[in-house]
């Protein structure tokens, strides 16, 4: 591996680390308003939905594969569980569906 690639990887690591570290350093010991805390608490779910939902309708092989996965994810998310559990349950349902087909 050339040294240019190594320095590029190190640079990308530093560039992605800085925005993650700055809130911890700048907001240490400060309380955010309740409204802002509620908004920030929903960011992971909103981001996951924005990334995954378009893929449901652009599956080339089997449209039911996307619809079934989305339905499973919506149902489990409605129960109020963690985002990781939602993703894993959708993967489990689609694994069972793919073995049946």
Image (cartoon, rainbow, N blue to C red):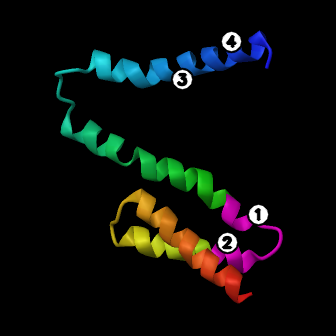
- Between circles 4 and 2, the one closer to the viewer is 4
Verify CB contact (< 8 Å) between mark 4 and mark 2. no
Q: Quadrant of the N terminus?
A: top right
The magenta span reads 55-67
Question: Mark 2 sits on what residue?
Answer: 66
Residue 49, given in percent of the width and then of the height, sits at 53, 56
Residue 54, given in percent of the width and then of the height, sits at 67, 58
Verify CB contact (< 8 Å) between mark 3 and mark 2. no
Residue 91, given in percent of the width and then of the height, sits at 57, 69
The residue at 77%/11% (across/down) is 4
Instruction: Give the mark nearest the N terminus, 3 or 4.
Output: 4
Label 3 crowd bin: few (<14), some (14–19), many (20+), radius 10 Å:
few
- Between circles 3 and 4, the one closer to the viewer is 4
Verify CB contact (< 8 Å) between mark 1 and mark 2. yes
Disc 1, SS: loop
Question: Marks 3 and 2, how far apart in space?
Answer: 32 Å
Disc 2, SS: helix
The residue at 83%/68% (across/down) is 60
Question: Marks 4 and 2, how far apart in space?
Answer: 40 Å
Which mark, by number, is residue 16? Answer: 3
Question: Mark 1 sits on what residue?
Answer: 58
Label 2 crowd bin: few (<14), some (14–19), many (20+), radius 10 Å:
many
Label 1 crowd bin: few (<14), some (14–19), many (20+), radius 10 Å:
few
Disc 4, SS: helix
Instruction: Give the mark nearest the N terminus, 1 or 4.
Output: 4
Instruction: Give the mark nearest the N terminus, 4 or 2.
Output: 4
């Amino acid at each position: 591996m050339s040294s240019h690639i190594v320095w590029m990887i190190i640079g990308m690591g530093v560039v992605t680390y800085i925005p993650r570290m700055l809130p911890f350093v700048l907001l240490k010991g400060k309380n955010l308003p309740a409204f802002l805390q509620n908004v920030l608490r929903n960011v992971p779910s909103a981001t996951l939905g924005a990334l995954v939902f378009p893929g449901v309708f652009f599956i080339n092989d089997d449209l039911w594969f996307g619809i079934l996965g989305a339905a499973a994810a919506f149902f489990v998310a409605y129960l109020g569980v963690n985002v990781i559990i939602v993703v894993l349950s959708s993967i489990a349902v689609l694994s069972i569906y793919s073995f049946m087909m």
